[in-house]
Image (tube, helix red, strand yellow):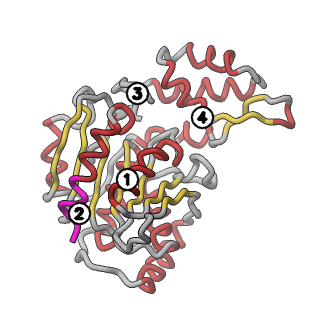
């Protein structure tokens, strides 16, 4: 499980209606100018072959679809729905491509919905992924049936010094041709004392068999480092809103969803609910059973 450290995190309204597949294809064609990428994903199929609206789950910064594997499998069984976990651009197994902006990532998600002909999926996103699902929903509310946001708010954040230092140290590991996990961990330990976060960050490195097993980055560290300020931003028009059912799940020991941001949440998502768990920023990782219970209850209450 990931650490409890809260410091690590990790076009407007249209009628909400069922969108035929040919309309989804048209919406994708309109997005081609955004230079979307085809996202890698894993899918869990419901045992019954249910036609219920699927779950589409999106990770945070430096994460991947693998972070949600266990939770996705359990939600598939409990809710009897297909679940999709995607790798955002520049993460996991998905293509590396600039720009790394919320507009670009949101466009990729709309393309994914179109490519897979998903009918009004339920979007779940953590941290950076939470901002992606919020922007996707606000720009295309007609595509989304329910929204679940894991410990992030629709506001601008200050840039923590941690993120640039993580990028710097991961690049140092790569450039030093290090093959020892202990040595790689030692280098990250110079800026990050929490072993769980170090282990999480090292999932972005892989052994290069053609170079004596030296660590190489799976992700474009230079591009992500240059994009950090933009990842902290939130520039969606305040006149946009999504009237569908929305759940925010906050970590009580995380700084991201405090009372002062509630008015902004309500402005964009007037039909929102807020639940809190006694965690830091990694709510779904720190209390997975309680997190899933909140998701299951919310989805069941808001499903036809």
Residue bounds of the magenta highlight: 297-304
For this view, does 52 lie left or right of residue 72? left
Front disc: 2 or 1: 1
Q: CA distance from mark 3 to mark 1?
A: 33 Å
- Say the numbered circle drawn on residue 285: none
Say which label, 3 or 1, has the lower sequence index: 1
Relative image position of residue 129 (x, y in whole percent): 41, 48
Which element type, helix, strand or loop, lies under badge 3? loop
Q: CA distance from mark 3 to mark 2?
A: 28 Å
Query: Which residue corresponds to the image point at 48% horizontal and 54% vertical from the top-left?
Result: 85
- Say the numbered circle drawn on residue 75: 1
When the figure is inspected, residue 171 is found, relative to residue 127, above or below; the finding is: above
Residue marked by disc 3:
160
Front disc: 2 or 4: 4
The kind of secondary structure the magenta stretch mainly shows is helix
Say which label, 4 or 3, has the lower sequence index: 3
Residue 139 lies in quadrant: bottom left
Q: CA distance from mark 4 to mark 1?
A: 24 Å
Say which label, 2 or 1, has the lower sequence index: 1
Say which label, 3 or 2, has the lower sequence index: 3
Q: CA distance from mark 4 to mark 3?
A: 21 Å
Residue marked by disc 2:
240
């Amino acid at each position: 499980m990931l650490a409890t450290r809260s410091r690590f995190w990790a076009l407007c309204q249209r009628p909400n209606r069922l969108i035929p597949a040919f309309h989804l294809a048209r919406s994708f064609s309109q997005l081609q100018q955004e230079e979307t990428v085809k996202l890698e994903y894993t899918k869990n199929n419901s045992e019954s072959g249910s036609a219920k609206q699927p779950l589409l789950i999106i990770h945070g910064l430096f994460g991947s679809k693998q972070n949600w594997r266990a939770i996705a499998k359990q939600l598939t069984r409990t809710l009897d729905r297909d679940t999709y976990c995607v790798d955002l651009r520049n993460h996991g197994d998905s293509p590396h491509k600039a720009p790394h902006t919320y507009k670009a990532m949101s466009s990729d998600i709309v393309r994914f919905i179109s490519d897979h002909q998903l009918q009004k999926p339920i979007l779940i996103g953590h941290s950076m992924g939470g901002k992606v699902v919020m922007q996707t929903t606000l720009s295309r509310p007609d595509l989304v049936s329910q929204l679940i946001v894991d410990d992030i708010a629709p506001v601008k954040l200050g840039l923590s010094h941690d993120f640039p230092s993580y990028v710097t140290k991961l690049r140092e590991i790569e450039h030093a041709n290090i093959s020892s996990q202990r040595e790689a961990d030692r280098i990250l330990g110079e800026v990050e004392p929490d072993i769980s976060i170090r282990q999480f960050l090292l999932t972005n490195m892989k052994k290069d068999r053609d170079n004596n097993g030296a660590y190489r980055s799976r992700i474009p560290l230079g591009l992500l480092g240059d994009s950090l300020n933009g990842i902290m931003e939130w520039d969606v028009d305040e006149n946009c809103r999504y009237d569908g059912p929305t759940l925010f799940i906050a970590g009580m020991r995380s700084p991201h969803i405090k009372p002062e941001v509630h008015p902004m949440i309500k402005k964009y998502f007037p039909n929102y609910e807020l639940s809190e768990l006694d965690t830091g920023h990694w709510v779904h990782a720190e209390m997975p059973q309680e997190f899933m219970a909140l998701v299951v209850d919310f989805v069941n209450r808001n499903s036809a």
